[in-house]
Image: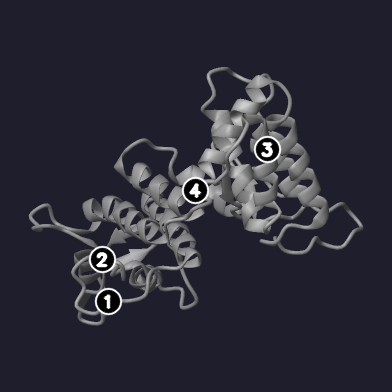
């Protein structure tokens, strides 16, 4: 589970929003952490070599020079420093021994205190999610099955250090299809997809919608339209293969939005809020 931001103390102003940049103090803390794990005995030097390889650094010479090359790389900018921390966490997680204190906890604390947009897990850095969104995701994926598997893929690809927003969007659609198709479509539907779901949800009997949402809405009529609007944001995927009108790739922000949308829709479906009249 991603670490949560530190709440403001009573009587103090609310903290500023999370930032993607690294302050000088946070930089110093992260560099010290790198030194703790990559400098010293032979094991630390071996880890430093693996991190240098993971960062694709071009260095020659003795293995005990690896940490100096890593620091030089990290000095180039905030992304380079965060990449060094990310790769180091991965190297530590893949090590042959179980460490007494999980290394990512100190990184998570440093990043939280520094109001960073990034947090730390055992495997590496992830984009920090709003605590409410994180809790909603964990609830929505608490039931094993294809829905949770696809939603987890969407979430992880959206929040990874090297995010894949197009893949996140694709898995978000698959998660929503997995949960809505059994509810909305007849079992005879050939090759069902989210487009078919939208078609069913838009149907009317006279002027009356055939489907209701268990949220009253502004008009107090339990209209299904809020769900339809959310689904039209998800569908169709602009990155799908064979599109006659190619679009720009999905942005990281879009990937996270789609993962959040899918989380909400999955939970609505599991709570029984999507029903036919």
Residue at mark 3 to residue at mark 4: CA–CA distance: 38 Å
Q: Secondary structure at mark 2?
A: loop
Residue at mark 2 to residue at mark 1: CA–CA distance: 9 Å
Q: Secondary structure at mark 4?
A: helix
Residue in the foreground of this view, choosing between 117 and 130: 117
Dot 4 or dot 2, earlier in sequence: 4
Percent position of residue 188, x then y = 7, 55
Q: Is residue 30 left or right of residue 267?
A: right
Residue 199 appears in the rendering: yes
Above or below for 238 versus 273: below
Q: What's the residue at 58%, 43% (across, down)?
A: 59
Count the numbered circles shown.
4
The 10 Å Cα crowd at callout 2, few under 14, some 14 to 19, many 20 or more, is: few
Q: Nearer the viewer, mark 4 or mark 2?
A: 2
Q: Nearer the viewer, mark 3 or mark 2?
A: 3
What quarter of the picture does the C terminus occupy?
Answer: bottom left
Above or below for 142 versus 253: above
Give the residue at mark 1: 246
What quarter of the picture does the N terminus occupy?
Answer: top right
Q: Is residue 38 left or right of residue 145?
A: right
Dot 2 or dot 1, earlier in sequence: 2
Q: Nearer the viewer, mark 3 or mark 4?
A: 3
Q: Is residue 178 left or right of residue 156?
A: left
Give the residue at mark 4: 137
Q: Secondary structure at mark 1?
A: loop
Give the residue at mark 3: 67
Q: Secondary structure at mark 3?
A: helix
Q: Is residue 145 left or right of residue 255?
A: left
* Disc on res. 222: none
Dot 3 or dot 1, earlier in sequence: 3
Percent position of residue 128, x then y = 61, 52
């Amino acid at each position: 589970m991603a670490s949560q931001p530190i709440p403001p103390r009573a009587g103090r102003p609310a903290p500023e929003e999370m930032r993607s940049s690294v302050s000088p103090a946070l930089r110093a803390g992260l560099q010290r952490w790198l030194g703790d794990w990559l400098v010293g005995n032979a094991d630390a030097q071996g880890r430093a070599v693996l991190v240098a390889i993971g960062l694709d650094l071009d260095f020659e010479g003795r293995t005990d020079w690896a940490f100096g090359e890593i620091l030089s790389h990290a000095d180039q900018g905030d992304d380079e420093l965060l990449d060094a921390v990310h790769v180091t966490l991965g190297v530590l997680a893949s090590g042959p021994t179980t460490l007494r204190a999980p290394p990512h906890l100190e990184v998570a604390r440093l990043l939280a205190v520094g109001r960073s947009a990034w947090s730390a897990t055992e495997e590496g850095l992830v984009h920090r999610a709003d605590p409410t969104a994180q809790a909603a995701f964990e609830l929505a994926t608490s039931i094993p099955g294809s829905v949770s598997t696809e939603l987890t893929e969407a979430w992880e690809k959206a929040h990874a250090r090297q995010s894949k927003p197009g893949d996140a969007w694709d898995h978000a659609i698959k998660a929503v299809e997995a949960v809505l198709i059994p509810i909305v479509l007849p079992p005879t539907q050939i090759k069902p997809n989210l487009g078919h779901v939208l078609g069913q949800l838009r149907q009317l009997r006279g002027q009356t919608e055939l489907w209701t949402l268990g949220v009253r809405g502004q008009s107090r009529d339990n209209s299904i339209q809020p769900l339809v609007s959310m689904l039209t944001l998800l569908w169709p995927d602009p990155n799908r293969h064979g599109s006659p009108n190619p679009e720009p790739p999905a942005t990281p922000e879009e990937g996270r939005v789609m993962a959040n949308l899918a989380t909400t829709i999955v939970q609505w479906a599991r709570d029984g809020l999507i029903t036919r009249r």
